[in-house]
Amino acid sequence: MTHRLAVLGHPVGHSQSPRIHQAFASQVGIDIRYDKIELPLDGFEAGARGFIADGAKGFNITVPFKFDAYQLADSVSDNARLAEAVNTITVLADGELLGDNTDGPGLITDIADNLGWHLRGKRILVLGAGGAVRGVLGSLLAAEPEYVHLWNRTPAKSAALVDQFDGPLGCATSDELESAYDLVINGTSAGLKGRLPAIPARVIGRDSHVYDMVYSQQATDFNQWCQAHGAAMTRDGLGMLVEQAALAFEIWFGLKVKTQPVMAMLRAT
Ligand code: ATR
């Protein structure tokens, strides 16, 4: 039996999800077909229902439909509720749609397990206040950092986001930012437009670890900037991409998969 899966988004042309899930399926000997389905901006629900009618076992959801998927799901996990975003839907035998969000846990797995960077008791700076950041804040706070400071180009947006989470989370304007955070996470889309978030260089110290949630074949502009200012280590979002996929695969099939070989495959091509 071939299990039907897909990623629904706009655009999806460059999505690596089919390759990642094919690799997982080969590892555990499951037969899947994983498509990329690009939907019109006002066509998420119709597209999702169409794919379900085609016999979908489940699907991933990417930009800009994670909130639409949250609304479409019949029930959602705590993670998804906190993020108000769903990146993984499972179609149950009776047609019920379960919504989950594996972005936050995927980030934490990459940082804590793959990289071995500690989060508990650490001083963390997160840049950005859009969907990418909203999706991971709950998981970051659950890892018990000393505190998380949120910086955003438009401060009103980070202030609004902070109000929606419990825990040691606060906003910081550029003037208020501290020196040498233990961990700096870039969740802005500035790099996609060839820009850098306009933060002062003092946030990077020689013990700072830096995680850019964007994935790129070369070092991202943000990571290069942090290296130039003396960061101890930098990492891009490839690991998060593969780990969030592994968690989705586990939700669908109840099987854990190895992520290291899949990361190596993506790095090599
Ligand atoms: P995503 O779903 O990827 O998070 P988004 O919701 O559009 O996308 O959010 C994009 C984030 O990147 C926002 O925090 C945005 O800042 P604003 O709220 O001020 O728009 C941030 N961003 C985009 N371009 C940026 C730039 N050149 N410098 C700094 N931040 C930028």
Image (cartoon, rainbow, N blue to C red):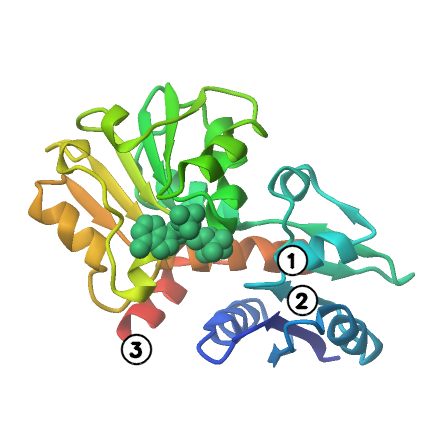
Q: What residue did someone put label 2 on?
A: 59
The kind of residue tagged 3 is: Thr
Q: In the image, what residue occupies the spot 22% across and 53% down?
A: 222
How far apart marks 3 and 1 lie (CA) works out to 26 Å
Q: Residue type at mark 2?
A: Phe
Residue at left offset 62%, top offset 79%: 37
* Residue at the image point whose x is 51% and y is 70% from the top: 17
What's the residue type where badge 1 is placed? Thr
- Residue 184 locus on image (x, y percent): 28, 38
Q: Mark 3 or mark 2: which comes first in sequence? A: 2
Q: Which residue is mark 3?
A: 269
**Numbered circle sitting on residue 231:** none
Q: Indicate the position of residue 108 as horizontal and vertical percent values.
A: 44, 40
Regarding mark 3 in the picture, which secondary structure is present there? loop
Residue placed most toward the observer, 186 or 118: 186
**267 over 81 or under it: above or below:** below
Can you say which quadrant of the picture contains the C terminus? bottom left
Task: Work out how far the residue at label 3 is from the one at label 2, CA to CA, in angstroms.
Answer: 25 Å
Give yes or no for contact between labels 3 and 2 (Cβ–Cβ under 8 Å): no
Among the 4 quarters of the image, the one containing residue 2: bottom right
Q: Is residue 147 visible?
A: yes
48 to 204, vertically: above or below: below
Circle 2 sits in a helix, a strand or a loop, which is it?
strand
Residue behind mark 1: 88
Q: Is residue 120 visible?
A: no
Q: Are marks 1 and 2 in contact (CB under 8 Å)?
A: yes
